[in-house]
Image (cartoon, rainbow, N blue to C red):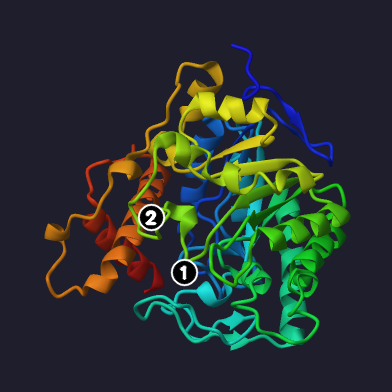
Amino acid sequence: MSTLLAQPFTLPSGAVLSNRICKTAMTEGLADPQNRATARHELLYRRWSEGGSGLLITGNVQVDRHHPERPGNVAIDNNGGLDELRAYAKAGRVGGNHLWMQISHAGRQTPGSVNRSPLAPSAVPLDIAGDGFGQPRAMTEEQILDVIRRFGHAAAVARETGFTGVQVHAAHGYLLSSFLSPLANRRTDAWGGSIENRARPLIEVIKSIKAAAGADFPISVKLNSSDFQKGGYDEDDCIHVVRMLNAVGIDLLELSGGNYERPRMVGVGDEGVPGERASTRARETYFLDYTARIRPVATMPVMVVGGFRNRSTMEEALQNNALDVVGLARPLCVDPAIVHGLLSGAITTCEAPEQTMKLNLADVPAEVPAEMHDAIQMWGVQGWFCLQIIRLAQGLDSDRTRNVFEAFNAYAANEAATVA
């Protein structure tokens, strides 16, 4: 069957994707205690590579091992592990696909179990219930410049070890994303204030990568269309940033949205309550609606991720030029080979178990305060998929039997064991 999904796509750098489906970044938590890649990464990414996606993007690889988004992130921070990265990259390309390393710095969203005083644009803590995150420290200019250098170094290592590109994570409230937000970035120097100043760290990171890894090395940026917070980074800001990215030149722009305070990227509904979701059709076009103003501004190819479940919707989005690459994530946690079926037409709908995963309060002990229920729902669903990734990395099939509260507890136990 000849479809747009199955057609090759050439990027500005000349790199060619074999089809229009990308396995987007999902956190793995599979690194060893020194934040190095392991055999589990090899097995996991071999399975995904054999699954048929034209592009695989790894989960967070941190440029500073003291600022992970969760324990078990791979880091490139003078911690060795180059041979392990080479094995990881080789396994993740067996299907003839591209394999891009997502490089990141978690900033103030670093778990408190790892770092109680993480670096951030300003000393503005997260507005989240509980004690999961520490009090951030405002970065000095020297520290900002060091992080920019670290991104360039990580990209050079990615190229050296066999990855075919990188994605800069500038979304979801991590460090570069928080620089973009006027709520998180209260600086009055050259790194704060106007959107041009708030975007300067991201633009300088792109320049650093080009200098360190070569101008022909594919670069993607993951960028929020909006943070969905009153007075925060919005669509107008995004349009400004996209124009700045046009000028510096990148290969692929992935548009997403939200952060830990407003977690739209993990399925929080319109009223901000985890589990309240619209129809399948509305969910699939959710970020497409938010990016309708941004797409015409972008001179680089655009990818959108966020709820695609029907093959017909993916094809329609490509036909309407709403995007160039379709991003899929959670369906590949349930079935790592699902892309082959989508490309051939044998599969028309991806399973979406999260749509029926609602926290049952009967499962929650009475001593757990009500204000924690939303967080348990969000992290329980997120944890459910993280646990599926761990199973895939062990060579097992996915397990659909855990409920939200069980997944929340199992995920928390896994994170605590990883820290230890």
x then y, percent, for residue 384: 33, 51
For the C terminus, the image quarter is bottom left
Density class for disc 1 (Cα within 10 Å; few <14, some 14-19, many ≥20) is: some
Compared across the picture, whether 211 is left or right of 63 comes to right
Q: Is residue 224 rendered to the left or right of residue 294?
A: left
Residue positioned most to the top? 1
The mark found on residue 378 in the picture is: none
Instruction: Tell me which amino acid carries mark 1.
Output: Glu
Residue 412 horizontal/vertical position (percent): 31, 65
Q: Nearer the viewer, residue 190 or 40?
A: 190
User: Can residue 162 be seen by looking at this rendering?
Assistant: no
> Who is closer to the viewer here, 117 or 305?
305
Q: Quadrant of the N terminus?
A: top right
Identify the secondary structure beneath mark 1.
loop
Task: Identify the residue under disc 2.
Answer: 382
Toward which corner of the image does residue 375 lie, by quadrant?
bottom left
Pinpoint residue 370: horizontal percent, then vertical percent: 22, 71
Q: Residue at x 62, y 53 (%)?
A: 85
Residue found 81% across the figure and 55% down from its top: 243
Vertical comparison of 160 with 311: above or below: below
Please say whether residue 367 is visible from this viewpoint: yes
Q: Residue at x 39, y 43 (%)?
A: 278
Q: Name the residue at 61% across, 31% down.
A: 317
Residue underneath mark 1: 261
Binning the other alpha carbons within 10 Å of mark 2 as few (below 14), some (14 to 19) or many (20 upward) gives: many
Q: Earlier in the sequence, mark 1 or mark 2?
A: 1
Question: Closest to the observer: 143 or 362?
Answer: 362
